[in-house]
Image (cartoon, helix red, strand yellow):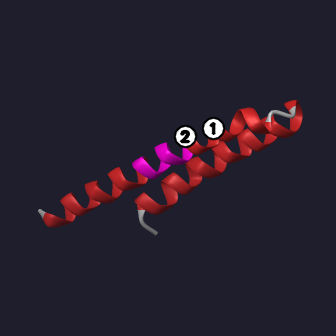
Amino acid sequence: MKKYIWLPCAFFSVGLLFYIYYGIKWNAWLLNLPNILIYLVIVLALSWAHWKKEQLRNKS
């Protein structure tokens, strides 16, 4: 499996579990929703950067 697939999925899973735990424990779902969306954007950017890095590595 490619690094640009599994690494962002692992980061997103761990982060999402943290936000879910925090939301259940402190009943802070509405406070966490913008954080989850921002975190998703960051993880997607990480995935894109790893994908581009692999493309450049394969090109040379």
13 on left or right of 60? right
**Furthest residue toward left:** 60
Tell me: residue 39, above or below residue 51.
above
Q: Main secondary structure of the magenta part?
A: helix
Q: Where is residue 18 shown, x and y percent of the image?
A: 72, 39
Magenta highlight on residue 40:
yes
Residues at discs 1 and 2 in contact (Cβ within 8 Å):
yes
Q: Classify the position of the C terminus by image quarter.
A: bottom left
Task: Give the residue drawn at x 46%, y 69%.
Answer: 1
Q: Secondary structure at mark 1?
A: helix
On the image, numbered disc 2 is attached to which residue? 38
Task: Give the residue drawn at x 33%, y 59%.
Answer: 51
Magenta highlight on residue 60:
no
Task: Give the residue drawn at x 81%, y 38%.
Answer: 23
On the image, numbered disc 1 is attached to which residue? 34
Task: Give the residue drawn at x 24%, y 63%.
Answer: 55
In the foreground, 60 or 36:
36
Where residue 15 sits, quadrant-wise, is: top right
Q: What kind of residue is marked 2?
A: Ile
Q: Which residues are magenta?
A: 39-45
Q: Where is residue 43 shown, x and y percent of the image?
A: 49, 48
Q: What kind of residue is marked 1?
A: Pro
18 on left or right of 23? left
Q: How many marks?
A: 2
Crowding around mark 2 (Cα neighbors within 10 Å: few <14, some 14 to 19, many 20+) is: few
